[in-house]
């Protein structure tokens, strides 16, 4: 699982029919502290995430197990919207 922030949307009028009616979002991976990490990921939204929300992503076979993704050509799915992140400061760097 990966933490990410929703930074945009994808509109594709021509796509695999199994993706019809599904929202595709551009996500920027972030650290637990909320700092941007390298790259972007396009993910299918299974939880009605919104712009700038921090989300939980899964990829590969885990993404195809997400609600509504079975038998769809999906590599990354948004499976949760993050309310808060808490890190034990004593465990940082270990």
Image: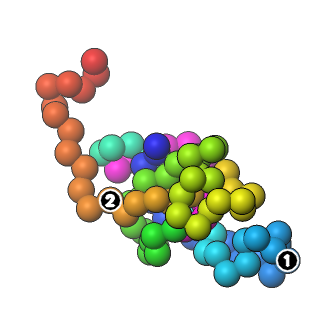
Where does residue 77 sit, x and y in percent of width and height?
A: 56, 57
Residue at horizontal 56 percent and vertical 46 percent from the top: 62
Q: Is residue 14 above or below residue 94?
A: below
Residue at horizontal 76 percent and vertical 70 percent from the top: 18
Q: Is residue 7 visible?
A: no
Where does residue 39 sit, x and y in percent of width and height?
A: 60, 47
Q: SS class of the residue under badge 1?
A: loop
User: Is 90 positioned to the left or the right of 10 in the image?
Assistant: left
Q: SS class of the residue under badge 2?
A: loop
Residue at horizontal 37 percent and vertical 63 percent from the top: 81
Q: Nearer the viewer, residue 71 or 53?
A: 71
Residue holding disc 2: 82
Residue at horizontal 54 percent and vertical 58 percent from the top: 66
Q: Is residue 79 visible?
A: yes
Residue range corresponding to the magenta coloring: 34-45
Q: Is residue 54 above or below residue 3?
A: below
Q: Nearer the viewer, residue 61 or 43?
A: 61
Query: Which quarter of the figure has residue 22?
Result: bottom right
Q: How is the image coloured?
A: rainbow
- Identify the mark at residue 38; answer none if there is no mark: none
Quadrant the C terminus occupies:
top left
Query: Which quarter of the figure has residue 87?
Result: top left
Which is nearer the N-term, disc 1 or disc 2? 1
Where does residue 12 sit, x and y in percent of width and height?
A: 77, 76
């Amino acid at each position: 699982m990966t933490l990410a922030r929703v930074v945009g949307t994808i509109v594709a009028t021509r796509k695999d029919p199994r993706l019809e009616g599904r929202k595709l979002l551009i996500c920027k991976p972030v650290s637990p502290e909320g700092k941007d990490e390298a790259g972007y990921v396009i993910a299918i939204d299974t939880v009605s995430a919104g712009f700038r929300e921090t989300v939980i992503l899964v990829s590969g076979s885990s993404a195809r197990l997400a609600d509504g993704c079975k038998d769809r050509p999906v590599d990354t799915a948004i499976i949760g919207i993050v309310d808060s992140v808490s890190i034990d400061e004593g465990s940082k760097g270990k």
